[in-house]
Amino acid sequence: MITIPVTSEEGIKLLGQLNNNANQIDKAFNVESELGANGLIISGKEENIKSAEQVYLKLLESIKHGADADSQLVKYLTNLTLDNDVDEVTFSPDLICINSKGRPVHCKTAGQKRYVEAIKDNELTFAIGPAGTGKTYLAVAMAVKAFRANEVSRIILTRPAVEAGEKLGFLPGDLQTKVDPYMRPLYDALYDLMGFETYQKNLEKGAIEVSPLAYMRGRTLDDAFIILDEAQNTTPEQMKMFLTRIGFHSKAIVTGDITQVDLPNNYSSGLVGIQNILKNVKGIQFVHLHAKDVVRNDLVQRIILAYEKVEKKRKTKGNRYEKKI
């Protein structure tokens, strides 16, 4: 048995709503957790107690830095502890920004922390990883932070207008109405971080621009925070076009998932080979996010891992076939 010294308020947050956090940890490590007079008490076998303690200490660290100790974070820390990787997780006291509802935006995983640090330190950052890892949301959060601090005078968000495996056919309305469905994830992030009224006011002033990638041709984007989302759906020519738009006093982020390319079969993705082209260029960093960095429903993480397992088997079979030949 061990006791982690915590205040009553910290202890309640650690246990979670209706003791959900404690139930998760108890089940994962076969221990029992409860609040005592002097702190959080963990009972069980010594090695199990130590593992549970690691999770609780990381949760406590996150609480002290203003983050929510929710079930998703508990699941993440539990999995890392089981894999002996929990020591890599650190919670920065610096929040990214405050969203429109007054809630702090923090990194929730070690991969996200590396991503945010790369954005701070480089003019151009590539974030490559599966759905649900926060690639787009954190990029927009960093853009909003820079905009509020007057580090840039405008935010430019763009993505290729490529349909995800289905033909939508003719869409009624003017040009903006036609492209809005493709831009919806970017709008959602901006609404959450800035609020609709603030977003609308800055949009009307030209301080915020959300548009298809095709509109970037021929422009030079100075004093701007530029985000290219869903970059796996760019062609090599489009990728080069976008990257050569970056002007003075600007910062750019390119996000994408190379496992979800929606381009026709006769087109290659501009994101797939870009790391080999730019790997030695100063001021550019590539960050790879993984299933462990997924911050959506746990089911999403399990789905991604299942796909990765199948893909690994497919590549292994392909290599064996090539060796026989």
Image: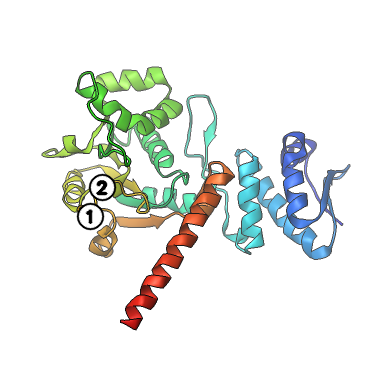
Q: Which residue is mark 2?
A: 263
Image coordinates of residue 100 in percent, x first then y, are 48, 25
Residue 163 - label:
none
Asked if residue 15 lies left or right of residue 260, the reply is right
Q: Residue at x 36, y 49 (%)?
A: 260
Figure check: 306 above or below 209? below
Q: Which quadrant would the C terminus be assigned to in this image?
A: bottom left
Q: Quadrant of residue 17?
A: top right
Q: Nearer the viewer, residue 150 or 229?
A: 229
In space, the residues marked 1 and 2 are separated at their CA atoms by 7 Å
- Could you tell me if residue 208 is visible in this image? no
Q: Earlier in the sequence, mark 1 or mark 2?
A: 2
Look at the numbered disc 2 and give the secondary structure of its residue: loop
Image coordinates of residue 178 in percent, x first then y, are 24, 25
Asked if residue 96 lies left or right of residue 27, the reply is left
The amino acid type found where label 1 is placed reads Ser
Q: Are marks 1 and 2 in contact (CB under 8 Å)?
A: yes
Image coordinates of residue 16 in percent, x first then y, are 72, 38
- Could you tell me if residue 199 is visible in this image? yes
Q: Residue at x 25, y 28 (%)?
A: 179
Image coordinates of residue 198 in percent, x first then y, are 38, 20
Q: Residue at x 52, y 50 (%)?
A: 303
The amino acid type found where label 2 is placed reads Leu
User: In this figure, which colouring scheme has been used for the structure?
Assistant: rainbow
